[in-house]
Structure formats: C-alpha cells, structure tokens
Image: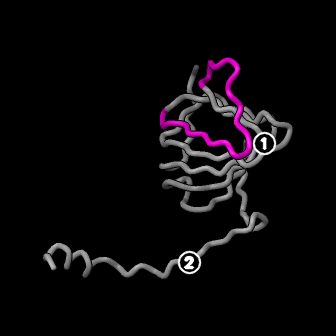
C-alpha cells in the first residue's frame, strides 16, 4: 500500500452503520417566520449551512423581489407557484410534481398563486438568506 493511502486509511474515522430514516409528515416540526412561511428541517441547519427542508407558504403569498446567495432546487408537492424575474409578464406556473431551480444571486419573485397553501421540498446549496432588491 502506498504511504498516502495508508495514512488516509489510518486517519479516516470509521463510518457509522447506515440507517434508513423515516419521518412521517405528521411528525415534521414546522418553524413559521413572521411572514407566515413555514420550514420543516429535514437535513442541515438552514441558517448556517446547505439544507434540505419542506417549505409551506400560505395561499396568496407573494415575496418582494429578492436574491439568495445559494442556488435553490425545489419540487412542488402541493399548490401552484410562480418563480420569475421581477418584471416578468405572465410567469409560468408550476404545480405538484414540478421541479424548479433558481440560480444563486438571481433576482426573482416567488408567489403561491393557488387557493390552498403551497408546499415544496427544497434543497439550498448554502445557508438561507433573503436579500431584497430594487427592481
């Protein structure tokens, strides 16, 4: 064995046995922001690192134009949303089963346009932030 490989093997901690993690929806712990948007963490601390979470927006929620420092990847589970540039006319609607990706630093407006709440499964490749922009 080459010395570097032996060193890496000697200093790498043993991995814990893998486990299947099951989280029934009725056990999710939702944290609601003052704006009414709720986050249920699945993995990671959204305020400090990349994270994976369920996100629920009340029907009719429309964000102000903003950017995020990290790219967002989402799959719609319930409701209908739009994610578009602040000046977009007739933005595309995405519903259950649809995928969206919003690149880091791209100004956009997100809206839950359905009569019921919008729920999405969201991964963000960096910590959460919300940086308002002037269109």
Residue 44 percent across, percent down from the top left:
54, 60
Tell me if residue 100 is in the magenta stretch: yes
- The quadrant of the picture occupied by the C terminus is top right
- To which residue does mark 2 refer? 19
Residue 98 percent across, percent down from the top left:
67, 42
Residue pictured at 69% horizontal, 32% vertical: 82
Provide the residue span drawn in magenta.
85-105
Q: Relative to residue 123, is residue 104 depicted above or below?
A: above
As rendered, which of 121 and 94 lies closer to the eye?
94
Residue pictured at 50% horizontal, 42% vertical: 71
Asked whether the residues under the numbered discs 1 and 2 touch, taking CB atoms below 8 Å apart as contact, a structural biologist would say no
Q: Quadrant of residue 130?
A: top right
- To which residue does mark 1 refer? 79
Q: Relative to residue 11, is residue 118 depicted above or below?
A: above
Per the model, the C-alpha gap separating discs 1 and 2 is: 32 Å
Q: Name, please, the residue furthest toward the left.
A: 3
Q: Relative to residue 45, is residue 119 depicted above or below?
A: above
Marked residue nearer the N-terminal end (1 or 2): 2
117 sits left or right of 67 in the view: right
Q: Name, please, the residue furthest toward the right.
A: 115
Whether residue 33 appears in this view of the structure is no
Residue 84 percent across, percent down from the top left:
62, 28
Whether residue 19 appears in this view of the structure is yes
Residue 106 percent across, percent down from the top left:
51, 31
Q: Which mark is residue 98?
A: none
């Amino acid at each position: 064995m080459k010395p570097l490989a032996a060193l890496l093997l000697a200093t790498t901690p043993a991995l814990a046995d893998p486990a299947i993690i099951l989280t029934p929806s009725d056990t999710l712990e939702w944290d609601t922001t003052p704006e009414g948007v709720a986050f249920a963490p699945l993995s990671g601390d959204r305020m400090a690192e990349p994270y994976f979470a369920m996100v629920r927006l009340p029907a009719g929620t429309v964000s102000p134009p903003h950017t995020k420092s990290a790219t967002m990847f989402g799959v719609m589970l319930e409701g209908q949303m739009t994610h578009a540039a602040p000046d977009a006319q007739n933005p595309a609607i995405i519903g259950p089963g649809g995928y969206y990706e919003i690149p880091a630093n791209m100004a956009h407006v997100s809206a839950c346009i359905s009569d019921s709440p919008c729920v999405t499964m969201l991964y963000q490749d960096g910590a959460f932030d919300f940086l308002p922009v002037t269109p």
